[in-house]
Amino acid sequence: MSEKREALVKEVADLSRFGSKFVKAIETTLAGGVKECRFLPSGRKIFSVVGRLGEEFIVPGRPYCSCSNFFFRVSGGSEELCYHLLSYMIAAKTGRAVVVEFSDDEYGDYFSALVKDVFDLFSRSG
Ligand SMILES: [Zn+2]
């Protein structure tokens, strides 16, 4: 486990400037927390990251994350990104995102379950 960790840290050493977020993102990536959900046959993708508190919905290209850190700090301009987006960057760069396939018909159910998780998380963190 620690060897795997060291190898991963080395691969993405340029991102270590994010400090404690980098450490959290490395743990999240190693735990398989970065998920790429592919919907077929359309090929559309949705990304989510299972972090310490629960699952967050992310849009890497925008960038966007549903966590409160992103909303208050990143949107507010005081931080560059949250550790969920950093986890995604690490996983994408090193091929460690966990791919899950769904059929297009399942999109509605998938998305409402994800939104419910995000909502529950907000309720719990106050
Ligand atoms: Zn986030």
Image (cartoon, rainbow, N blue to C red):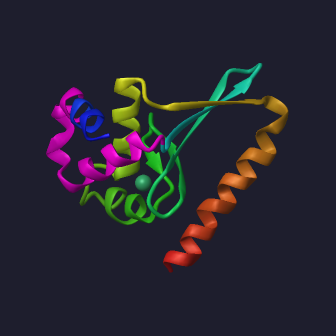
Most extreme residue toward the bottom is 126
Q: Is residue 22 magenta?
A: yes
Locate residue 65 relative to residue 17 in the image: left or right: right
Ligand 1 resides in the quarter of the picture at: bottom left
Residue closest to the eye, 53 or 108: 53
Can you give x and y, in whole percent of width and height, for residue 73 in the image?
32, 62
Part of the protein shown in magenta:
9-32
Can you give x and y, in whole percent of width and height, for residue 84 in the image?
41, 49
Can you give x and y, in whole percent of width and height, for residue 125 in the image?
49, 76
Residue closest to the eye, 58 or 27: 27
Q: Is residue 48 above or below residue 51?
A: above
- Seen at 16% across and 32% down, the residue is 14
Locate residue 44 relative to residue 84 in the image: left or right: right
Figure label count:
0
Q: Is residue 90 above or below residue 93?
A: below
Choose top left, top right, bottom left or bottom right for residue 91.
top left
Locate residue 13 relative to residue 84 in the image: left or right: left
- Seen at 42% across and 42% down, the residue is 63
Q: Is residue 116 above or below residue 64?
A: below
Residue closest to the eye, 109 or 79: 109
- Seen at 81% across and 38% down, the residue is 106
Looking at the magenta stretch, what is its main secondary structure?
Answer: helix
Q: Is residue 71 magenta?
A: no
Q: Is residue 25 above or below residue 61?
A: below
Residue closest to the eye, 39 or 13: 13
Locate residue 2 relative to residue 97 in the image: left or right: left
Can you give x and y, in whole percent of width and height, for residue 17 in the image?
14, 44
- Seen at 32% across and 40% down, the residue is 1
